[in-house]
Image (spheres, rainbow, N blue to C red):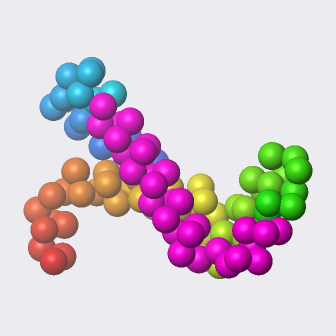
Amino acid sequence: MAQDDLYVEFLKKLKSEKSDTEIQTFIANLLNFGATELYTLMIMFLTEEDFAAVEAIKDDAEAEKETAARFKLRTSMSPEEFIIQLRDEVAKGYLFPVLNANKK
C-alpha cells in the first residue's frame, strides 16, 4: 500500500468511527505528538555546535533551513520525512491494531 494511500485509508476509517470533534481532537493530538517527537529528536541528535550555528543566523527562514539540514545530517532524514514516518506508523497502528500488537 502506498504511503499516501495508507494515510487516506486511515482518515476514512477515522471518519467512519469518530465524530467531527473527535477527529479534530485526534488530528490535533497527532500533530502535537509529532512536534514533540521531532523536538525531542533534535535535542538528542543536534550538537551544541549545531545549535550555536543556527542561533547565529538572524533570518528565521534561513535558520529553519539550517536546522533541517543539520537534522538530516545527524539522522539521515529530514524533519518532514520523520513526521511522515511517524504519521504512517500511527496510521498503521490505527488501521491494523492486531498486526501491530503481534510485533511486541
* Image x and y of residue 3, in percent: 44, 54
* Image x and y of residue 87, in percent: 41, 53
Q: Residue at x 38, y 36 (%)?
A: 28
Q: Nearer the viewer, residue 4 or 75?
A: 75
The reply, left or right, for residue 43 in relation to residue 14 is right
Looking at the image, which residue sits at the far top? 20
In the depicted structure, whether residue 3 falls above or below residue 19: below
Q: Nearer the viewer, residue 19 or 47?
A: 47
Q: Residue at x 26, y 22 (%)?
A: 21
**Which corner quadrant holds the C terminus?**
bottom left
Quadrant position of residue 69: bottom right
* Image x and y of residue 66, in percent: 79, 62
The reply, left or right, for residue 5 in relation to residue 67 is left
In the depicted structure, whether residue 87 falls above or below residue 21: below
Q: How many numbered circles does the render carry?
A: 0
The reply to whether residue 42 is visible in this rendering is: yes
* Image x and y of residue 12, in percent: 28, 34
Quadrant position of residue 88: bottom left
The reply, left or right, for residue 82 in relation to residue 56 is left
The reply, left or right, for residue 72 in relation to residue 33 is right
Q: Residue 61: within the magenta?
A: no
Q: Residue at x 88, y 50 (%)?
A: 58
In the depicted structure, whether residue 39 falls above or below residue 53: above
Q: Residue 48: within the magenta?
A: yes
Q: Nearer the viewer, residue 70 or 57?
A: 57
* Majority secondary structure in the magenta region: helix
Q: Residue at x 59, y 55 (%)?
A: 80
**Which corner quadrant holds the N terminus?**
bottom left
Which residues, given as a range, are shown in magenta? 25-53
The reply to whether residue 66 is visible in this rendering is: no
